[in-house]
Image (tube, helix red, strand yellow):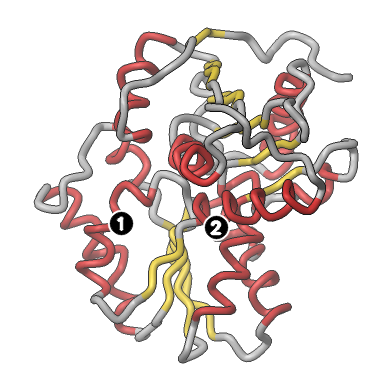
């Protein structure tokens, strides 16, 4: 048994959908969450900047003697996370690996759709991961930059006319391509899964990277005998912008009131180890 916490980070609030799944499948684990809300979004940044921010995020979480870190950010997970993961003596998980594996396993037609940020789509990381597992897969991709601000504005109701209009336009190509599996390649997207599912149709399987990653982490901790199942875990939240705004908005992603402290921190200070 290992009672150290798990560190989770994202560029903003979307990673909380991954935290929710971790709470569901690993209820005994303590979780330290860092939302880099002062520099959100990462999706339009250069690869070099994304990796710089990711290193700073991990360095902050390492202050808490964590036993594993989850990059609950599709952009970070698809823009070189593997390159920096080897720099740490703890497991580093990205949401892309588990989601790609699930898509390759679950597709029946071999036609997989992917939606995500511009940076995630541009990286071709999902393509490489899926094709390594299933070389005959046809992958149809679409960047959906308006989804994140819509979600963070609380426009997640399937009947919201603005969300519906944007989603119809974004998803038309994937629907026409007759994909049978669709990766929600940003951790904000599970909050609009109902809308996406209605547009794509009931025959399309939606892949939630946060849920897949939580299951993979559970398996890995069990393999390492590093789980902490004996009690109810605690959560602590850190942000780089307003803690008050985070507390109000986070309940949308967690589908519950935020339990635990929310503190504002700075990452611009020297964080190299």
Residue visible at 90% across and 38% down in the picture:
87
Q: Which mark is residue 13?
A: none
Residue 100 quadrant: bottom right
Q: Where is residue 201, by image quadrant?
A: bottom left
Q: Quadrant of the N terminus?
A: top right
Tell whether 250 sits left or right of 40.
Answer: left
Q: Is residue 47 left or right of residue 174?
A: right
Is disc 2 in contact with disc 1, using a CB cutoff of under 8 Å?
no
The residue that disc 2 covers is 212
Q: Is residue 130 left or right of residue 21?
A: right
Q: Residues within 10 Å of mark 2 (few under 14, many from 20)?
A: many
The quadrant where residue 271 appears: top right
Between the C-alphas of marks 2 and 1, the distance is: 15 Å
Q: Residue at x 67, y 38 (%)?
A: 50
Q: Is residue 260 above or below residue 45?
A: above
Question: Is label 2 or label 1 in front?
Answer: 2
Q: Secondary structure at mark 1?
A: helix
Depth order, front residue of 76/119? 76
Query: What's the mark number on residue 193?
Result: 1
**Residue 146 placement, left or right of 209:** left
User: In the image, residue 254 lies at what x, y percent?
Assistant: 37, 33
Residue visible at 62% across and 31% down in the picture: 230
Measured as percent of width and height from the top left, residue 64 is found at 74, 17
- Disc 1 crowd rating (10 Å Cα; few below 14, some 14-19, many 20+) is some
Q: Residue furthest front?
A: 230
**Residue in front for this viewpoint, 140 or 254:** 254
Q: Quadrant of the C terminus?
A: top right
Q: Position of residue 154 (x, y in %)?
A: 23, 34
Numbered label tally? 2
Classify mark 2: helix, strand or loop.
helix
At x 70%, y 79%, the residue is 133
Q: Is residue 90 above or below residue 132?
A: above
């Amino acid at each position: 048994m290992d009672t150290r916490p798990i560190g989770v980070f994202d560029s903003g609030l979307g990673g909380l959908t991954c935290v929710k799944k971790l709470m569901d499948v690993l209820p005994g684990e303590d979780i330290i969450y860092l939302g880099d809300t002062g520099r959100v979004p990462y999706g339009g940044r250069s690869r070099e900047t994304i990796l710089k921010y990711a290193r700073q995020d991990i360095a902050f979480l390492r202050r808490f003697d964590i036993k594993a870190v989850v990059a609950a950010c599709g952009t970070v997970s698809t823009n070189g996370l593997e390159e920096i993961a080897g720099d740490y003596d703890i497991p580093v998980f990205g949401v892309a690996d588990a989601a790609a594996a699930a898509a390759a396993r679950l597709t029946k037609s071999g036609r997989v759709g992917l939606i995500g940020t511009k940076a995630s789509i541009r990286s071709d990381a999902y393509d490489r991961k899926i094709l390594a597992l299933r070389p005959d897969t046809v992958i149809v991709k679409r960047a959906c930059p308006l989804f994140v601000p819509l979600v963070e504005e609380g426009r997640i109701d399937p009947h919201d006319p603005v969300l519906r209009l944007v989603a119809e336009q974004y998803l038309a190509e994937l629907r026409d391509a007759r994909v049978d599996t669709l990766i929600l390649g940003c951790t904000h997207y599970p909050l609009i899964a109902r809308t996406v599912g209605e547009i794509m149709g009931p025959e399309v399987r939606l892949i939630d990277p946060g849920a897949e990653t939580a299951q993979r982490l559970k398996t890995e901790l069990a393999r390492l005998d590093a789980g902490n199942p004996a009690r109810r875990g605690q959560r602590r939240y850190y942000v780089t912008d307003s803690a008050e705004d985070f507390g109000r908005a986070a309940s949308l992603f967690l589908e519950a009131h935020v339990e635990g402290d929310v503190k504002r921190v700075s990452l611009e200070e020297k964080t190299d180890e």
